[in-house]
Image (cartoon, helix red, strand yellow):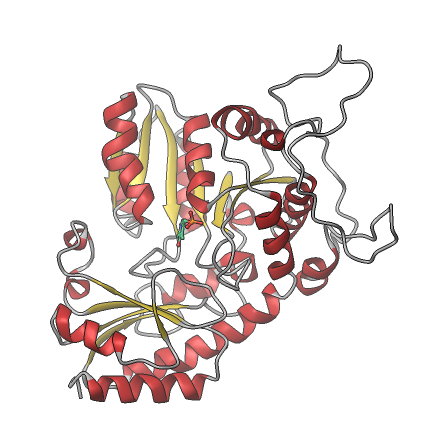
Amino acid sequence: MARKENPYREYGIGTQSVHTGTDYDVGTGAVRRPLHMANSYRLPDDLSQVNYSSTDLLMYARNGNPNQHWLEEKIAALHDAEDAIVLASGVAALHALFWTLLQSGDRVVYPKVSYMAVYRMFHELFNRKFGVETVMVDMTDLEAVRAVVTPGTRLVHIETPDNPTIGITDIAAVAKIVHENGAVLSVDNTFASPFHQKPLELGADFVVESLTKFINGHGDAQGGAIISNDVETLDRIRYEAQVNVGSVISPFNAWQIFRGSVTFPLRMRRISESSQVIAGWLEKQPYVTFVSYPGLQSHPGHELAKRQMKNGYGGVISFGVDADDKAVERFCAALRVVTFAVSLGHDESLIFPQPSYDERINLYPEKFRKGFIRFSIGLEEPEDIIRDLQQAFGKAGLC
Ligand SMILES: *Cc1c(COP(=O)(O)O)cnc(C)c1O
């Protein structure tokens, strides 16, 4: 696809999130670009050059839409990257990348702790259906990574901070091992977002993000992105996964995420500042068994996070309480400011207990196996969130 120069390249992230991908509407002069809900576009008079499986021409909804393309310009700019593809969800983006890169007989190395769908794809789908060799490893242990990333490995996928234990992986160190062995590295950057971390600068080949989370930030639209400087492979993904598998984003969701993304750096700053305060408070509570947040000195990845992240440490905290699943549910249900729901990165704080019967619980470090809660901090006043936690701990009989 033809790529646009980013005229705001030398400006900061706050300016880029306001100005890239937008312009006045040529037809009306409106200072907002329109939402184009159309399945088909007028074809050129001469059809001899048209490739119906490409995204080069606006022609049919699955071949792409203008709202998608404007959002792609912005996402690429936020990562200072050559190009980005925006698809229907974060998982659609992960699948599109894996589907395009991997063939039967290839070897992929993936983390012990990762987003649920990554675990499903590599633990039971790509291996059983397509004969891809999938190897799980603790990515926070570089010796272990070195032992399994052999020549002949096609892809190494990591997530940092990881979902749900908030473990930190050394992107630059893993990239070095990966490239020495002729493989490529993809990084799920959903938890950090480009406000805190730009993995391409640290040696990653591909970045995947769920735009559903912090980038949209309002809990009302789903989307995902693949970001890279390898523009040939991105075009292959457009052909193999967007047009011919069908993971395109709807114009409305792209429009909604574009709007949410304007305030993304402001929200991220507020959320990470609040998270630091709340994580510090949680750590002092006697009934809290552990707090996992990279901004805390007690986090094993704190020094590494200080080097590889900037402007703070993100908006998700994991912590434990000395209680069974039922008491943890009572605590979550008693919250009034914080919402008891899955997902993260919304304007409102969200809390989600990780049940002890989760089949992956034994893949997590020991302390995460009891009373483990994932907590996404929102835009509310941090003092109100703390008061809410306090009253709910009381109601659930935890303190
Ligand atoms: C939510 C999430 C995804 C998946 O994104 P969807 O938009 O829900 O498909 C992928 N990776 C991480 C780390 C996530 O938190």
The percent coordinates of residue 363 (x first, y second) are: 18, 51
In which quadrant of the rendered view does residue 372 lie?
bottom left
The percent coordinates of residue 358 (x first, y second) are: 17, 54
**Left or right for 35, reference 162:** right
Q: Let me know if residue 227 appears in the view.
A: yes
Residue pushed farthest top? Answer: 48
Residue located 63% across and 39% down the image:
83
Q: Let me know if residue 146 appears in the view.
A: no
From the viewer's side, name the closer residue of 364 and 246. Answer: 246
Residue located 68% across and 65% down the image:
14
In which quadrant of the rendered view does residue 331 lie?
bottom left
Residue located 16% across and 49% down the image:
359
**Left or right for 15, reference 212:** right
Work out which quarter of the rendered image holds the N terminus and state it. top right
Q: Is residue 312 above or below residue 383?
A: above
The percent coordinates of residue 42 (x first, y second) are: 76, 27
Q: Is residue 185 above or below residue 369?
A: above
Residue located 17% across and 70% down the image:
371
Total numbered labels placed on residues in the image: 0
